Image (tube, rainbow, N blue to C red):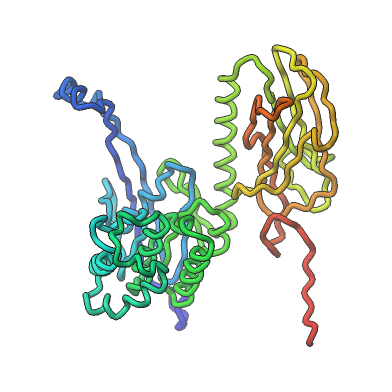
Amino acid sequence: MTQATGTPAPDVVVVDDVAKRFVIRKDDSLKERLVTLGRGRRHREDFWALDGVTFSLQAGTTIGLIGHNGSGKSTLLKVIGGILEPTRGTVATRGRVAALLELGAGFHPDLTGRENVYLNASILGLSREEAAARFDEILEFSGIGEFIDTQVKFYSSGMYVRLAFAVAVHTDPDILLVDEVLAVGDEAFQRKCLDKIREFQQEGRTIVLVTHSLGQVLELCDRAIVLHHGSIAADDEPRAAVAIMRDLLEDRRREEAADRDAARADGPQIASVSVAAAGRVIDEPVYPGDDLDIVIGLRTGASLPPGWFLGVQIDSALGQVVYGTTTRRLGVDLGALEGVRRVRLRLEDTRFGPGKYFVNVSIIDEVGRHIDDATQAASFSTSDDGTAVGVVSAQPHFTDLDA
């Protein structure tokens, strides 16, 4: 990103070789700690939440931090915000930083909402006079209303985050750090938060966003960093970074599926699931109009009498159900299940939108009880020409009717 003069925008966040270590104690009780006192490090374990993270962020940029749970996203945001000191490396920021890192962080439970507004504004660098001048805007944005003079320990989680977000965005920050708060609150407030973020983007402010919503990353961010086990796995434009993130999630899913298979008993099981466009190999993209073949391998050590049925569901990468059916809905009687069997579900003329999709399969008995579930048992990716987002594919043609 460049300024109007054509000169490069200055770096406002510089993270250099940052590492953060936490010590995990294995002697949880006071008695255990007294027994192990003086016995060295045998009862402690080092956990590196971050290790060798380096990047810089230019003014006016919106960057997404993504990764699976435990990858170090929130820890990195706290280090940038000055909440945590790095074990190694340095972080330099330029300008006022406002951080929404945890639900109600910075709020005192025994103070009222009004008192916490002034307290938080002071922490973020505003004088009492400046906070008073902006108080009405903060109150209106939060939608707290008459509860502003109630102790915040009586607030719901939604009220907490609405007030915290309202204070943060009205303190004129140069850098806004946001950790998953857009997932809290009702839909109307989430839209209000997104509109405020877009307003900040137009004003040239810098935003660092931690989210599990890959759709928000594609919609809001100029750039995305994928964290994996505390290190940077990718630093790229959002679409490329999200693709790498989905590959990491797929690898993790396969590991969990292998562990699940090893732990199963000798009952009816979903032994395998594969998905591909008809006539093509697995892992090739699925194009609009393709037939999609889902092949399911079943096995059992003991006979399963007739009446059972299969359920198949396809989810988007964001967890949204985009298709689901069962053999019972389709009027298919699978008879008794004995030994090993393979079945195929073909979906004709599919029109999935761009992205990655996951296939879930269940064996269900005649009264609707799940005997075995294979969650995210297989996945496929669709082609992406960059013209649209969403879960439905269509050919867009735009016409100016008044031209």
Report how many numbered discs are placed on residues in the image: 0
Residue at (32, 72) in percent of width and height: 171
Q: Is residue 222 visible?
A: no
Please provide percent x and percent y for residue 325: 76, 40
Please provide percent x and percent y for residue 152: 30, 58
The extreme top residue here reads: 302
Please provide percent x and percent y for residue 248: 55, 42
Picture quadrant where residue 238 is located: bottom right
Residue at (42, 69) in percent of width and height: 143
Q: Is residue 68 visible?
A: yes
Residue at (65, 28) in percent of width and height: 370
- On screen, residue 259 versus residue 352, left or right, reads left
Q: Decide which of 40, 271 is in the foreground and name it.
A: 271
- On screen, residue 403 versus residue 209, left or right, reads right
- On screen, residue 245 versus residue 320, left or right, reads left
137 is higher (above) or lower (below) than 363: below
Please provide percent x and percent y for residue 254: 59, 32
Q: Decide which of 50, 212 is in the foreground and name it.
A: 212
266 is higher (above) or lower (below) than 18: above
Q: Decide which of 260, 311 is in the foreground and name it.
A: 311
Picture quadrant where residue 369 is located: top right
Residue at (36, 72) in percent of width and height: 139
